[in-house]
Image (cartoon, grey):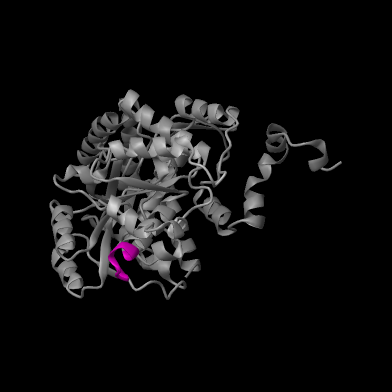
């Protein structure tokens, strides 16, 4: 008898077929993902998750310092968000009728705009890249200009419009031609002004802290860029997809710089507690009124699932938890503790170059050591592929210490820490102790670690 004829039961299906997970991905999805996971030893089988922790099939506990690339801001399965989703399903709402005005989208927009009093309206989509696509379209239409500016090394998404403002060449290769957008260096006001003189620039989209490499915008840049843009009748768009919703110790990352009021803000990731895909583009009233200028243009830009009740309920629950449990303040305090503890290790380890970031968005950068013994090993890795040393650190953190992290981008010697915003001193102690042990091993010539480095070198050479 087939599975379909027996009726659908999720627990039974997972019990019967869950062990096939890697084979199913290799056969039906991105076949390079399981290959990569097998190569670096990340092919774990996680069975359960709660808060900032996973458990594997043997009951071993893992600390999550990645939070699904920032999606799980409240950790996994926060009880308030979980209850909200049960409640909205049990309510049997007439969702997505298309021809009514449901209350939940308006309520979530109201809550978001309360954190953003200089903006007026919200468009809800399904992801960060869709939030960026919305901002790009709105900026072009509202200004009547074709070109957007972005920063080198930026990451704004992988759909075609967002890819046109993606500052990482590796993501763009093979997908050109893209939109006629132009890059400037993060912090380069002279380059920004040169581009604006052409008169065809709709706006600048910028991450207040770039996710690739964890690179904060220089002090004063956002405020000065805003003034230049407005002088030339162009817009400032803050991509807060990863940095927003409390990640950096403020509700928005741009708030660390006084006087910055972006014309549009892109949000996603942590907004729904990791349960339901959601994205949001916040903007000034006049921008919306340009795009939706008449009843004929009521659907000039829309998203089929953008205001679905589950996503809206999850977003409302997340914002409630942020306030009730003082999550943003915790991100600021715990992030400063973690950053300070790690920064204190820079002088101790010659392979460490810098620790940077804000709140619970922290980058650990590695660099060329001084001693001959370590320098030769570093050179071996760099000759094969930049970024292998950071990967060498990530793997023993998982394999030996059961802590999940990842490198901050391809060809970067940077590990990015973006854990759930609910972690505290206990998790900081655990991570710092494990990281210290791994760095001790690297500097003392630990055979297991450097043997794995040679494996990575072989793999990198083979893939050229």
Residue closer to the observer: 256 or 62: 256
Q: Residue furthest front?
A: 295
Q: What x and y, as percent, mark residue 92? A: 60, 31
Tell me if residue 412 can be seen.
Answer: no
Q: How many marks?
A: 0
Residue 98 is left or right of residue 281, and the answer is right
Q: Is residue 253 above or below residue 81?
A: below
Residue closer to the observer: 140 or 416: 140
Residue span colored magenta: 140-149
Query: Was residue 41 drawn as part of the magenta stretch in this picture?
Result: no
Residue closer to the observer: 53 or 204: 204
Residue 58 position by quadrant: top right
Query: Was residue 144 drawn as part of the magenta stretch in this picture?
Result: yes
Q: What x and y, as percent, mark residue 248? A: 27, 40
The residue shown at (60%, 33%) is: 57
Residue 289 is left or right of residue 2, and the answer is left
The residue shown at (35%, 57%) is: 135
Q: Is residue 221 above or below residue 357?
A: below
The residue shown at (22%, 64%) is: 185
Tell me if residue 63 can be seen.
Answer: yes
The residue shown at (25%, 53%) is: 263
Residue closer to the observer: 149 or 138: 138
Q: What x and y, as percent, mark residue 457? A: 43, 61
Instruction: Quadrant for the N terminus, please.
Output: top right
Residue 95 position by quadrant: top right
Q: What x and y, as percent, mark residue 327? A: 32, 29
Q: Is residue 233 above or below residue 404?
A: below
Residue 13 is left or right of residue 392, and the answer is right
Q: Residue furthest right?
A: 1
């Amino acid at each position: 008898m087939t599975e379909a004829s027996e009726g659908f039961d999720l627990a039974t299906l997972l019990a019967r077929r869950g062990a096939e997970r890697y084979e199913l991905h290799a056969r039906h999805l991105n076949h390079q993902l399981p290959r990569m996971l097998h190569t670096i030893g990340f092919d774990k089988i996680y069975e359960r998750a709660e808060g900032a922790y996973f458990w594997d099939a043997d009951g071993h506990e893992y600390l999550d310092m990645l939070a699904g690339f920032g999606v799980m801001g409240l950790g996994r399965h926060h009880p308030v968000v979980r209850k909200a989703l049960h409640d909205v399903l049990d309510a049997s709402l007439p969702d997505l009728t298309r021809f009514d005005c449901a209350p939940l989208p308006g309520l979530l927009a109201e809550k978001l705009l309360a954190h953003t009093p200089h903006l007026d309206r919200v468009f809800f989509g399904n992801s960060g890249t869709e939030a960026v696509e919305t901002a790009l379209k709105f900026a072009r239409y509202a200004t009547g200009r074709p070109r957007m500016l972005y920063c080198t090394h930026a990451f704004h998404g992988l759909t075609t419009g967002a890819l046109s403002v993606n500052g990482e060449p590796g993501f763009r290769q093979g997908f050109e031609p893209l939109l006629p957008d132009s890059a400037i260096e993060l912090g380069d006001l002279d380059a920004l002004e040169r581009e604006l003189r052409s008169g065809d620039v709709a706006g600048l989209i910028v991450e207040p802290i770039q996710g690739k490499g964890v690179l904060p915008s220089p002090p004063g840049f956002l405020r000065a860029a805003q003034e230049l843009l407005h002088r030339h009748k162009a817009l400032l768009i803050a991509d807060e997809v990863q940095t927003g919703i409390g990640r950096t110790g403020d509700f928005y990352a741009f708030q660390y710089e006084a006087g910055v009021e972006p014309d549009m803000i892109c949000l996603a990731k942590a907004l729904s507690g990791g349960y339901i895909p959601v994205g949001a583009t916040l903007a000034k009233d006049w921008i919306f009124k340009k795009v939706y200028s008449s009843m004929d243009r009521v659907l000039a830009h829309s998203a089929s699932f953008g205001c679905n009740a589950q996503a809206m309920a999850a977003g409302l629950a997340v914002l409630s938890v942020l306030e009730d449990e003082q999550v943003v303040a915790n991100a600021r305090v715990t992030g400063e503790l973690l950053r300070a503890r790690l920064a204190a290790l820079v002088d101790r380890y010659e392979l460490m170059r810098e620790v940077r970031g804000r709140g619970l968005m922290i980058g650990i950068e590695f660099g060329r050591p001084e001693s001959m013994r370590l320098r030769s090993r570093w050179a071996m890795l760099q000759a094969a592929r930049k970024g292998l040393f950071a990967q060498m650190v990530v793997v023993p953190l998982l394999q030996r210490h059961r802590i999940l992290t990842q490198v901050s981008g391809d060809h970067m010697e940077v590990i990015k820490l973006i854990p759930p915003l609910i972690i505290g001193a206990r998790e900081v102690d655990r991570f710092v102790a494990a990281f210290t042990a791994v760095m001790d091993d690297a500097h003392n010539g630990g055979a297991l670690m450097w043997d794995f480095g040679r494996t990575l070198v072989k793999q990198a050479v083979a893939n050229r």
